[in-house]
Amino acid sequence: MGQDDAPAERFTDEEYAFLRFVRFGQLPERVLPSEMVEEIKTDLPQDVPERAFDARRWGEAGGL
């Protein structure tokens, strides 16, 4: 194993930056802290929806 596994050439930081640009493209503008909003996660309400047809309320025949 040894030296055979090492890359043949080394890149400078500028070359790595160029390779990242080629692979990922232009990064979006940085979001400023004044443009950020706080996100608050909440649970969904546990309300049970009203049934469309309740036989106890409308009677068996569906009339009043």
Image (cartoon, rainbow, N blue to C red):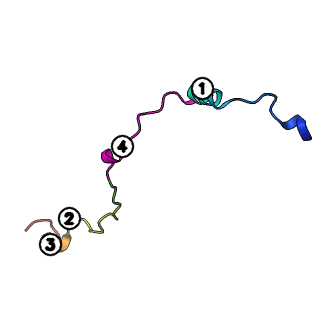
Residue 55 position, x and y percent, is 19, 70
Of callouts 3 and 4, the N-terminal one: 4
**Residue drawn at x 64%, y 32% as measured from the top left:** 13
- How far apart are the alpha carbons under marks 2 and 3? 8 Å
Quadrant hosting residue 28: top left
User: Which region of the structure is painted magenta?
Assistant: 24-37
> Which residue is more in the foreground, 19 or 62?
19
Residue 34 vs 57, above or below: the answer is above
Can you identify the residue that label 2 sits on? 53
- How far apart are the alpha carbons under marks 2 and 4? 53 Å
Q: Quadrant of the C terminus?
A: bottom left
Q: Residue furthest right?
A: 1
Of callouts 2 and 4, the N-terminal one: 4
Which residue type does callout 4 highlight? Answer: Leu
Of helix, strand and loop, which mostly describes the magenta segment? loop
Q: Nearer the viewer, mark 2 or mark 4?
A: 4
Q: Nearer the viewer, mark 3 or mark 4?
A: 4
Can you identify the residue that label 3 sits on? 57
Taking the magenta stretch, the answer to whether it contains residue 6 is: no
Circles 3 and 4 in contact, beta carbons < 8 Å: no
Of callouts 4 and 1, the N-terminal one: 1
Number of marks present in the image shown = 4
Q: Would you call the spot at circle 3 few (<14 residues within 10 Å), some (14-19), or many (20 or more)?
A: few
Which residue type does callout 2 highlight? Answer: Phe
Of callouts 2 and 1, the N-terminal one: 1
Can you identify the residue that label 4 sits on? 32
Q: Nearer the viewer, mark 1 or mark 3?
A: 1
Residue 6 position, x and y percent, is 83, 36
